[in-house]
């Protein structure tokens, strides 16, 4: 549904399959495989990825000492492709398949962090995008706003993160249009986790931290003084639903969720993800508590990213900071950490001369 | 010992080291370097024209810039088979867009479309390093650089391909004025940019074996696309 519409390759492959299949003799494998959709989608298939069947790699026209590797997926792929595409994703052919060895490295390595405090959620990330030793981009954006009150931090392969954020933004917008209210951060995290589930076991690598502020939208849901009036008006709500609505009013506020492509979905007060996260954690564990002011929170986040970039080779360049409150997210200007490094050097030199004087 | 393509430009081991398992790889590395620079009202896309594989040169006249529209040029380097297919697919999609929307795609729209085309092949990627250069809707120069699976962003300058690691720092210094103290940031003129691109490729041909033969420069302005070919080292 989502990815297929965005990537729009369905028509190309379906034509090939429908025209080629009757003519293909029984037993020959067609070099493509489909993953069918998740239960909530109303389309036949959610994603139409071109996934090479392992036999394609073994059946080369050039015979020079190839060893056919026995794999679990070959049993599945020997079935009729139509049959596999119509079943739900209980059997995933590529979960154990040996994917094509890539001749290039993917972008990885980062430091991102987010924590909750009394003034909302503070999110910070570095801006270096590295590809096994080469800095592919010194000014990439790792904090992507999804909507006015939700921001996502990305870690992992940048292409995966960019696409999946885009899909999540689209799904959240559709939810908002259909149901008249924003989906909560918890719901968004669950949605992302379920969308990533069919790709568990593949080389997809997404470790996202969703930071948002829930609630505070429609008056008749949140405003407790008007609640009785609006509820009386609308007699559809039963007593239990009224209780749950009142409970919901306490559930608004800052939220922080960590979602990973291996299936993890965690709620917390403080998260740091990436190769530089151990260094960031040490600064954050030392200084973060609920009662921080906004300026203190900003300086701690900045310091944590700076220390992580100082020690971690795969993090560096600049720091991005976003602050999410009930009014939405605000972005702080990108700051080059090179200046911070030189300031620190000056300070150390100054301290050294001071101590020598005494 | 499993031979994999972790490092595409590396020499193959020809001495006997024990039984080697050869597996068919659907990828090959055909070399080549692409570069794009965006200016105030122009964009330049340049590429060398050498097509190589391993120790051999297949062709000395295979440029890697492809004209997409009157205001957009794409440079593709990597595996030549995937470059050809990808440009055919992009051309087809451009035509479809033109017929259904009655207007040509803008550079930004082409970039977004290419990102989704590349990502649809996430598990069997196109081994192509793309750089799109063109003019945006306001007439300013735009450069979009991609990785093989579709992650992209807009830049001012970018080098891709086999000599990218050599060219990118030079561009950072000369166009981005990085790591230079006390230098006036003069905006780049078109003639200066073309001269810089030529010099930069001459340097690349000196040190990178997969770059050379000739340089094809496409300058995109609102008047149109102007192509120029300059010879480089042939050895």
Image (cartoon, rainbow, N blue to C red):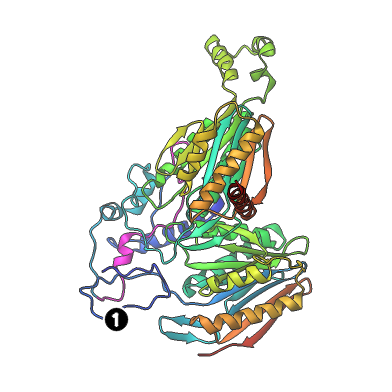
Question: Image quarter for residue B91?
Answer: bottom right
A180 relative to B222, above or below: above
Front residue of B78 and A64: B78
> Which chain contains the residue that carries disc 1?
B
The residue depicted at 50 percent of the width and 80 percent of the height is B208
Query: Percent from the top left, x then y, of residue B93?
Result: 60, 63
Assess whether residue A49 is covered by the magenta stretch.
yes
The residue depicted at 62 percent of the width and 78 percent of the height is B200
Query: Percent from the top left, x then y, of residue A327?
Result: 69, 31
In this rendering, does residue A239 appear at all? yes
Question: Image quarter for residue B227?
Answer: bottom right
Front residue of A39 and A338: A338
A8 relative to B209, above or below: above
The residue depicted at 68 percent of the width and 83 percent of the height is B228
Q: Secondary structure at mark 1?
A: loop
Q: What residue would you read off at disc 1?
A: B14
B54 relative to A71, above or below: below
Q: Which residues are magenta?
A: A38-64
Query: Percent from the top left, x then y, of residue B57?
Result: 46, 86
Assess whether residue B139 is covered by the magenta stretch.
no
| Main secondary structure of the magenta stretch | loop
Query: Percent from the top left, x then y, of residue B102?
Result: 72, 60
């Amino acid at each position: 549904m989502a990815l297929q519409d965005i990537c729009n390759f369905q028509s190309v492959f379906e034509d090939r399959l429908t025209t080629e299949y009757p003519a293909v003799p029984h037993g020959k494998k067609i070099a493509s495989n489909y993953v069918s959709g998740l239960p909530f989608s109303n389309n036949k298939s959610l994603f139409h990825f071109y996934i090479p069947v392992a036999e394609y790699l073994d059946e080369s026209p050039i015979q020079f000492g190839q060893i056919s590797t026995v794999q679990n997926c070959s049993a599945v792929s020997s079935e009729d492709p139509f049959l596999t595409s119509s079943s739900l994703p209980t059997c995933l052919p590529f979960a154990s398949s040996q994917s094509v060895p890539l001749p290039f490295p993917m972008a990885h390595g980062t430091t991102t962090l987010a924590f909750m405090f009394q003034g909302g959620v503070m999110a910070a990330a570095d801006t270096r995008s590295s590809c096994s030793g080469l800095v592919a981009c010194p000014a990439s954006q790792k904090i992507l706003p999804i909507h006015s009150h939700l921001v996502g931090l990305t870690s992992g392969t940048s292409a995966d993160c960019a696409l999946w954020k885009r899909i999540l933004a689209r799904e959240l917008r559709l939810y908002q249009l259909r149901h008249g209210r924003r989906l909560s951060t918890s719901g968004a995290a669950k949605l992302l986790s379920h969308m990533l589930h069919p790709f568990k076991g593949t080389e997809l690598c997404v470790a996202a931290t969703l930071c948002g502020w829930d609630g505070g939208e429609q008056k008749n849901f949140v405003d407790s003084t008007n609640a009785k009036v609006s509820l009386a008006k609308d007699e559809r709500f039963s007593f239990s639903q009224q209780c749950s609505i009142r409970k919901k009013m306490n559930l608004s506020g800052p939220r922080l969720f960590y979602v990973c492509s291996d299936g993890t979905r965690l709620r917390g007060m403080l998260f740091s993800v990436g190769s530089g996260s151990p260094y960031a954690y040490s600064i954050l564990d030392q200084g973060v508590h609920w009662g921080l002011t906004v300026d203190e929170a900003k300086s701690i986040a900045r310091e944590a990213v700076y220390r992580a970039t100082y020690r971690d080779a795969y993090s560096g360049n600049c720091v991005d900071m976003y602050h999410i409150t009930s009014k939405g997210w605000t972005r702080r200007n990108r700051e080059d950490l090179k200046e911070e490094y030189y300031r620190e050097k000056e300070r150390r030199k100054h301290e050294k001369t001071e101590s020598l004087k005494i | 010992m499993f031979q994999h393509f972790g490092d595409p430009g590396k020499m193959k081991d020809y001495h006997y080291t024990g039984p080697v398992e050869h597996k068919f790889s659907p990828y090959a590395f055909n070399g080549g370097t692409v570069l794009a620079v965006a200016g105030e009202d122009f964009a330049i896309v340049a590429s060398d024209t050498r097509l190589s594989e391993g120790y051999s040169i297949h062709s000395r006249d295979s440029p890697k810039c492809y004209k997409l529209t009157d205001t957009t040029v794409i440079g593709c380097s990597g595996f030549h088979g995937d470059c050809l297919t990808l440009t055919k697919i992009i051309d087809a999609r451009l035509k479809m867009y033109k017929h259904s929307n009655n207007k040509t795609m803008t550079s930004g729209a082409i970039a977004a479309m290419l990102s989704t085309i590349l990502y649809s092949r996430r598990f069997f990627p196109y081994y192509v390093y793309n750089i799109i250069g063109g003019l945006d809707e306001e007439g300013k120069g735009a450069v979009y650089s991609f990785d093989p699976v579709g992650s992209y962003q807009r830049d001012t300058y970018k080098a891709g391909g086999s000599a990218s690691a050599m060219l990118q720092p030079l561009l950072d210094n000369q166009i981005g004025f990085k790591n230079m103290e006390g230098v006036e940031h003069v905006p780049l003129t078109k003639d200066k940019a073309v001269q810089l691109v030529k010099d930069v490729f001459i340097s690349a041909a000196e040190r990178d074996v997969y770059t050379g033969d000739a340089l094809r420069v496409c300058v995109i302005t609102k008047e149109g696309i102007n192509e120029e070919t300059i010879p480089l080292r042939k050895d």
